[in-house]
Structure formats: C-alpha cells, structure tokens
Image (cartoon, grey):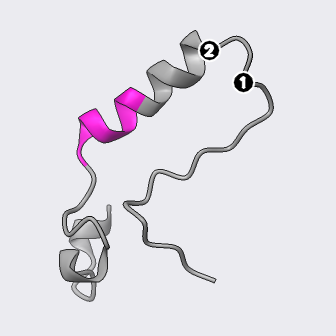
C-alpha cells in the first residue's frame, strides 16, 4: 500500500527499505507462539514512527 503513494520513499525509513511479507510474518509467528506475551501491539514499521 505504501509503495503506491508517490510521496513514499524508502530513504525516509530507518531500515532503508519497505517491509516485506517475511518482516510481518515473523512478528505474527512470534505473537502466535509466545503465550506469555499478552495484550501487546507490535508496530512493524522499520523504525519509522509518526506522531
């Protein structure tokens, strides 16, 4: 979705690339397999935080 935005640039993201399926999948697996971690929101954004 972000790559369709003409103003989006990977240079603005600290990780210097847009997220891939594997980036999000690894977080989903971690949340699904860790029973001790509850009620957490994990932001998969490459270090790009907006206020």
The crowd level at tag 1 (other Cα within 10 Å; few <14, some 14-19, many 20+) is few
Question: 31 left or right of 14?
Answer: right
Quarter of image, res 21:
top left
Question: 47 left or right of 13?
Answer: right
Mark 1, residue position: 37
Secondary structure under tag 2 reads: loop
The crowd level at tag 2 (other Cα within 10 Å; few <14, some 14-19, many 20+) is few
Quote the CA–CA distance across marks 2 and 1: 6 Å
State yes or no: discs 2 and 1 in contact (Cβ < 8 Å).
yes
Q: Residue at horizontal 55%, vertical 79%?
A: 50
Q: Residue at horizontal 20%, vertical 81%?
A: 11
* Mark identifier at residue 34: 2
Task: Work out which residue is located at the far bottom of the displayed protein and give it.
Answer: 7
* Mark identifier at residue 8: none
Could you tell me which quadrant the N terminus lies in?
bottom left
Question: Front-most of 51 and 2?
Answer: 51
- Tell me residue 29's x, y (percent): 46, 19
Dominant SS type (magenta): helix
Question: 27 left or right of 4?
Answer: right
Q: Residue at horizontal 58%, vertical 23%?
A: 31
Secondary structure under tag 1 reads: loop
Task: Check if residue 48 falls in the magenta segment.
Answer: no
Q: Read off the magenta span.
A: 20-26
Q: Residue at horizontal 36%, vertical 29%?
A: 25
- Tell me residue 9's x, y (percent): 21, 81
Could you tell me which quadrant the C terminus lies in?
bottom right
């Amino acid at each position: 979705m972000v790559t369709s935005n003409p103003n989006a640039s990977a240079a603005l993201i600290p990780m210097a690339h847009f997220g891939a399926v594997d980036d999000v999948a690894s977080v989903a697996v971690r949340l699904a397999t860790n029973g001790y971690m509850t009620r957490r929101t994990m932001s998969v954004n490459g270090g790009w935080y907006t206020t």
